[in-house]
Amino acid sequence: MAAHEKPDLPAHRNLFRMILAPTIWAIHFLLAYCTAAIWCAKDLGDPDTLTLVVTGYTVAAEVAIVFLGLKMWTQWDYLDDYDYVHSESTDEHRREFLGHAGFMLACLSFVAVIFNTMPVWFAGTCL
Amino acid sequence: MRPLVLPAAAILAIALAGCRGPQSALDPAGADASSLASLFWVMLAGAVVLWLLMNGLIFYAWRAKPRPISSKAARILIFGGGVVFPTFVLFFLLAYGLSMMPDQRAPGEGLRVEVTGEQWWFRVAYWPEGASEPIHSANEIVLPVGVRSEITLKADQVIHSFWLPSIAGKTDMFPGRVTRMSLLPTEPGEFRGQCAEFCGESHAWMAFTARTMTPDDFAAWVEAEAAPAAVPETDLQARGLDVFLSEGCGGCHAIRGTPARGRVGPDLTHLASRGNLAAGALKVTVPDLIAWISHPEAIKPGAKMPAFDHLPREDIAAMAAYLESLE
Ligand SMILES: [Cu+2]
């Protein structure tokens, strides 16, 4: 391995993966609202098309979140040892803790992205 | 238990009486207010059910000496009741609430009323369909029943909010920005609206009256409102107009049909046909007019109209008599 190349962080040290799903949720929120604001201010066309565009963002975000959630679920590997409490300061407990928290955050983000999209589904108008 | 029934009924009656009246979101006379009122009742019913459920559970756990349940059942209860159930309830409530919004903001079908929030009164300009010039008025909104009218909202110096709860929800008014809403009154009547955003000393004195009428009555009203002011009929009224003009009231107020053209303060052309004086602070009566002209700040702190109590009382009374004749 060359000196400038960073090694992949081992799972028990990688905090970033845990917050990736909520980050997608935040980006989805921004994208949806900015698109709607610009669409309506610049009158870019039919609001129904806007609904389609934002729903497109939602599908992409949800696919990514499901993928991440599954990864976190595997990292937690609950079905392996049914560990629900991760209180020891060992690599395994850290890894499972981060997986557990990341999995739950992914579930939360999944629902949140749907809630983000509901305005265009149920009140899809520029008025 | 018995002695509590009467006082409880009395309190309930008083509380419910507050739901009626010319300024109540729970006594709707407009399409949007009706849907907001049903939203309120649905939410209230749901809240009551949840309240009973939660308190029932607390009561059960605390008083009914329950047997322990299996940890699997407990997990289902906590996950189901704490995560799945609220998520679905929120989903349906949000869907229900959001789906109401497009109707609330539907475009108007003819008449457009431009309302500007001033400190502390409402400047009103009616643009009937096809009009090239507005009809200026103030502190009163007159609308036809059964037609959705477009309301354009502006503000002068500070933020205000336009709120006519019997007809619809509220919308803020911003300096330098135009907001809009639309109103669809369903019943003829007289209502009261109120500035709903703190805007300075006399914010609490910034109200307006609203009248809704059949489209025919409305057409007649528009014609009358567009006409110039009544000509003085008595000597007293004629003297009132003279004083009004010579004291410079016309620098701030317009009375169409006279040389008074000011646009700083409310248009007074048909003052006496409005249901209020000085944005709901007073009524259009001679004593109230005298009180207002003599010392506006005594009635509305900070009012942007100078006091005229240095004038002879007879002059003020003459102006009051004249203004009170401006139907
Ligand atoms: Cu105000």
Image (cartoon, rainbow, N blue to C red):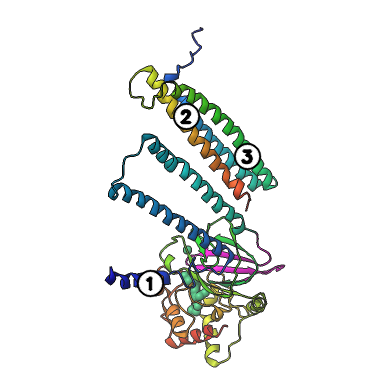
Question: Residue A123: x, y in percent?
Answer: 60, 50
Chain-order first, disc 2 or disc 3 = 3
Inter-mark Cα distance, 2 to 3? 23 Å
| Residue B110 lies in the magenta-colored region | yes
Q: Identify the residue shown where x is 36% and y is 36%.
A: B70
Q: Is mark 3 within 8 Å of ligand 1?
A: no
Tag 1: amino acid: Ile
State left or right for residue B104 relative to residue B300.
right
Look at the numbered disc 2 and give the secondary structure of its residue: helix
Which chain does tag 1 point to?
B
Tag 3: amino acid: Thr
Inter-mark Cα distance, 1 to 3? 49 Å
Residue A55's tag is: 3
Do residues under tags 2 and 3 come within 8 Å of each other at their CB atoms?
A: no
Span shown in magenta: B107-135
Which chain does tag 3 point to?
A
Q: Where B234 sits versus A78, above or below?
A: below
Q: Quick one: which residue is furthest to the top in this view?
A: A1
Tag 2: amino acid: Phe
Look at the numbered disc 3 and give the secondary structure of its residue: helix
Residue carrying label 1: B14
Question: Residue B316: x, y in percent?
Answer: 46, 84
Inter-mark Cα distance, 1 to 2? 53 Å
Q: Quick one: which residue is furthest to the front in this view?
A: B67
Q: Quadrant of residue B314?
A: bottom left
Q: Which quarter of the rendered picture does the N terminus of chain B lie within? A: bottom left
State left or right for residue A33 relative to residue B298.
right
Q: Is mark 2 within 8 Å of ligand 1?
A: no
Residue carrying label 2: A103
On the question of residue A22 being in view, the answer is no
| Residue B125 lies in the magenta-colored region | yes
